[in-house]
Image (tube, grey):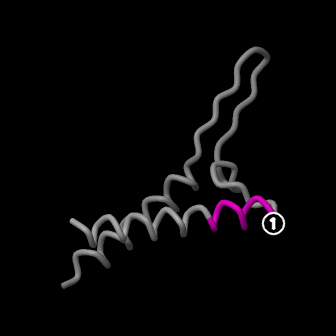
Amino acid sequence: MGRLLIYIGFALIFLGVLFIIGERTGIRFGRLPGDIVYRGRNTTFYFPIVTCILLSAVLTLISWLLNRR
């Protein structure tokens, strides 16, 4: 249980650093190129497809690394 908490802590620190670097370089997670945005007169539809794919790949890599014993 202790190792799991340490891994989660490192993952949160890593994500925090990624968000800070992304904001400074102009790459905002959730607003990546390829995300679908439709703006009508009174509505806005936003679907972050590229963000979902990137998040899925990162989480898959993390789970693969943790279960590789």
- Residue 50 screen position, x and y as percent: 58, 55
Q: Residue at x 46, y 67 (%)?
A: 11
Indicate the quadrant containing the C terminus: top left, top right, bottom left or bottom right.
bottom left
- Which one is nearer the viewer's eye here, 10 or 32? 10
**Rendering quarter of residue 43:** top right
Relative to 22, is 3 above or below?
A: below
Judging by the rendered image, the residue that carries numbered circle 1 is: 25
- The quadrant of the picture occupied by the N terminus is bottom left
> x%, y% of residue 7?
36, 70
Question: Would residue 57 appear left or right of 64 to someone viewing this image?
Answer: right
Q: Label 1: state its secondary structure.
A: helix
The amino acid beneath tag 1 is Thr
Residue 6 forms part of the magenta stretch: no
Q: Nearer the viewer, residue 46 or 7?
A: 7
Identity of the residue drawn at 22% across and 75% down: 67
User: With 67 as the anchor, is 56 left or right in this view?
Assistant: right
Magenta residues (range):
17-25
Q: Residue at x 52, y 62 (%)?
A: 54
Q: Is residue 61 above or below residue 28?
A: below
